Image (tube, rainbow, N blue to C red):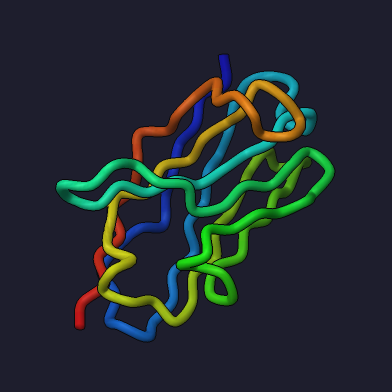
Amino acid sequence: QVQLVESGGGLVQAGGSLRLSCAASGSFFSMNAMGWYRQAPGKQRELVATITSGGITNYADSVKGRFTISRDNAKMSVYLQMISLKPEDTAVYYCAAYKDPWGTSIGSWGQGTQVTVSS
């Protein structure tokens, strides 16, 4: 099973930027899709962005144009660059490793990292 450790969360003012990182351990990282999800207080966990093993990306409408997901297979890491942050982006952000190259079935979750955007 893939183990995931997120980092890079914190407190930022509206309009600011943060870069989240997720380091993975285990084999087959480069063969599987990866994703970022978030969960705000009192809300369900929602998809933020995914990236397939081939580098195809997909974003929630709410973050398109502001967030960028990327991966470095040599470092077994996936990143989420966030710019123009809004208070509504405040949430715990989770890294997810899928069991397949296209992102259809999640295999592992990270522990989450808090992102707080102040107005």
Using the image as rendered, state which of residue 43 and residue 107 is in the foreground. 43
Residue at image position (45%, 29%) is 109
Q: Where residue 42 appears, x then y in whole percent?
A: 15, 47
- Decide if residue 31 is on the left or right side of residue 67: right
| Quadrant location, the N terminus | top right
Give the number of callouts.
0
| Quadrant location, the C terminus | bottom left
Q: Is residue 31 above or below residue 8?
A: above
Using the image as rendered, state which of residue 30 and residue 23 is in the foreground. 30
Residue at image position (50%, 23%) is 108
Q: Of all residues shown, which one is farthest toward the front?
A: 61
Residue at image position (28%, 42%) is 44
Q: Where residue 106 appears, x then y in whole percent?
A: 55, 25
- Decide if residue 68 is on the left or right side of residue 9: right
Q: Where residue 95 appears, x then y in whole percent?
A: 48, 40
Using the image as rendered, state which of residue 67 and residue 20 is in the foreground. 67
Q: Of all residues shown, which one is farthest toward the left?
A: 42
Asked which quadrant contains residue 86, the reply is bottom left
Q: Is residue 20 above or below residue 18?
A: above
Q: Of all residues shown, which one is farthest toward the right?
A: 54
Q: Where residue 77 appears, x then y in whole percent?
A: 63, 43
- Decide if residue 46 is on the left or right side of residue 66: left
Q: Is residue 63 above or below residue 50?
A: below
Residue at image position (41%, 42%) is 94
Asked which quadrant contains residue 35, the reply is top right
- Decide if residue 88 is on the left or right side of residue 103: left
